[in-house]
Image (tube, rainbow, N blue to C red):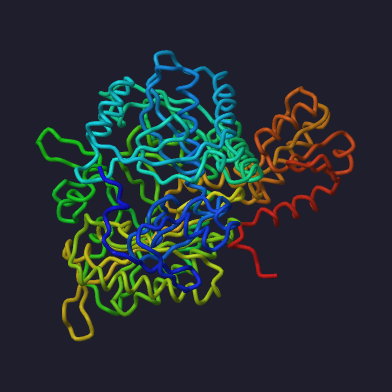
Amino acid sequence: MSDPRSDSNISEVTITFPDGKTRLVASGTTGLEVAKSISPSLAKRTVAMSLDGALADLADPITRDVSIKFVSRTDPEALELIRHDAAHVMAEAVQSLWPGTQVTIGPVIDNGFFYDFAKEQPFEPEDIPKIEKKMAEIIARNAPFTKQFWSREKAKQVFRDKGETFKIELVDAIPAGEDLKIYYQGDWFDLCRGPHMTSTGQIGRAFKLMKFAGAYWRGDSNNPQLQRIYGTAFATEEELKDYLHRLEEAERRDHRKLGREMDLFHFQEEAPGSVFWHPKGWTLFQTLIGYMRRRLDREGYQEVNSPDMMEKHFWELSGHWENYGENMFTTVLPDERVFCCKPMNCPGHVQIFKHGLKSYRDLPLKIAEFGKVHRYEPSGALHGMLRVRHFTQDDAHIFITEDQIMEECLKINDLMLSIYNDFGFEDIFIKLSTRPEKRVGADELWDKAEKALQDVLDEVTKRSNGRIRTALQPGEGAFYGPKLEYVLKDAIGREWQCGTTQVDFNLAGRLGAFYIDEHSQKKTPVMIHRAMFGSLERFTGILIENYAGHFPLWLAPLQIVVAPIVSDANDYALEVVEKAKAAGLRVESDLRNEKINLKVREHSLAKVPVILVVGKREAEEKKVSIRRLGSQDQSVMGLDEALASLSTEATPPDQKKPS
């Protein structure tokens, strides 16, 4: 295959720099040559270039008019290159340590990279430092990355001679007419589409191999099993240190671990992707529902409940069967009728809307449901409560006229931001997801729906004075309408997509819903689909990890444990429990004949926010000693005063009186 340097007959091309200045250069001039002509220091610190927004090798020839930006290794764009180059260096290190190992594929992924290897003997944990040491040696050699273009025949023959059978498959999979690139780093080379930085030394020392895992060739369980090595890399060692700290913190906060320690829920294989709620966990779950129910009631929502199973024909009419059928659970009855477990509540809500004639005066009509929905997720995608097959949505559908879209979407936005603020989430990111390839409805309806949500997003941004970040996600909308996705940032900087607002011009009409307008004509209502928490199971998992189990008192499933120091104080402990319950607090006693330090330690592990310690003196004086989760300090207060203070603290934020 020819080098693209010879593909252009143009003698000169125009390059445009980020500041808008332009320069004429000879066609075929490389990015490195341009950088050197500007400044030797620029050429020295540049590791790649961006041509019309696409990363390219600095040594690539420029054969057309183009906008150019030089990329240094500390620029955000360079992080992907650092990780890509680190993956190649890891592959060389593995083959150097274990000759005969086959290298397959090694892409960059979120937060790092991996490479899959075909190796006769499995990797061992002690191999990680060996590979890292060899990688450091390769990086220190600072060998340049260079690119060659090979014919398919040459590539296949070379890899065949090396025993790299997987590479031969990859060569065959490259579409005809597409460049076949080979990248060298010293003597070692690999098939790769690129680009790369200028040399291995640019990777730096801020890399770490994370773990081994199994993987099938091309993700197919019918193919050979490979061994995968995951790694990560950053521009600076400080960034790597921060990332590893976040990983440790995320592991400490893992909702599955905390769920066991706090006795909230469990999972088991007989019901994959489903939660077995324990009493304390169910109390937390119901606290969330109670909070949301109060917020919706004040906003004029009417709560309903729709069937969990409906006939397949119904889902064909709605468009779900065609566009979402692979994610639906079905069952066939003895009479051969096919029923589907509902993956969404919306078609059922349309039926409730249709029951009885509706006028434009009835709109907006707000229907809400805490409905259990069922969606088939591949077993490999399941992850505690963050990815399940059966979950409860705080779902609602607002039936409106077209001219009510802006007003109602803004009301939803204000309510949603207020709710997130009550849970401590103030850093919000809103994404507009537009029409997917697989969808229902005419393009002109999608045009209207997308414009309506863009107008809403513009107004939200304006009201927040730019505080709320926004982004566009082309092709990520639901099959029936575009949506706004509300993304929350948690205590350790992770982002979680929770609430959604979707404008739908399609579903109500497909299911025959209408209202009578002011001219006595039948009109199809617009539907707004919205959820605040989204999946309550998932939101619960997010909250557990965000708070690391240290819930604010109003949310804690068990708010107080009363623990006597000596058995003589047991009767007083029970008196404290009864008074606390009368004050509306969730409280238990611990009357075990154990030392108080053991009791405090166990209840602290279970993340109980408050422990009231009582002894003979407290019983005589009608006082309690208050110990707070995470603090070694304790304070002594009169019982009535302590319970009044705790009761005020445990009042949900939506029920607190304005100060």
Query: As displayed, is residue 484 above or below residue 410?
Result: above
- The residue nearer to you, when weighing 148 against 169, is 148
Query: As displayed, is residue 478 above or below residue 592?
Result: below
Query: As displayed, is residue 200 above or below residue 474?
Result: above
Residue, far left: 335
User: What is the total number of numbered labels drawn onto the structure image?
Assistant: 0
Does residue 21 appear anywhere in the picture? yes
Give residue 91's position: percent from left, percent from top.
45, 29
Q: Quadrant of residue 441?
A: bottom left
- Residue in the picture at 52% in, 76% down: 463
Give residue 292's position: percent from left, percent from top.
49, 57
- Residue in the picture at 54% in, 24% down: 131
Q: In which quarter of the image is residue 435?
A: bottom left
Looking at the image, residue 176 sits to the left or right of residue 305; the answer is: left
- Residue in the picture at 17% in, 61% down: 511
Give residue 531's position: percent from left, percent from top.
41, 58
- The residue nearer to you, when weighing 506 against 154, is 154
Residue, far top: 121
Does residue 279 appear anywhere in the picture? no
Looking at the image, residue 530 sits to the left or right of residue 542; the answer is: left
Quarter that holds the N terminus: top left
Give residue 299's position: percent from left, percent from top.
46, 69
Looking at the image, residue 351 sits to the left or right of residue 249; the answer is: left
- The residue nearer to you, when weighing 177 against 621, is 177
Quarter that holds the C terminus: bottom right
Q: In which quarter of the image is residue 567?
A: top right
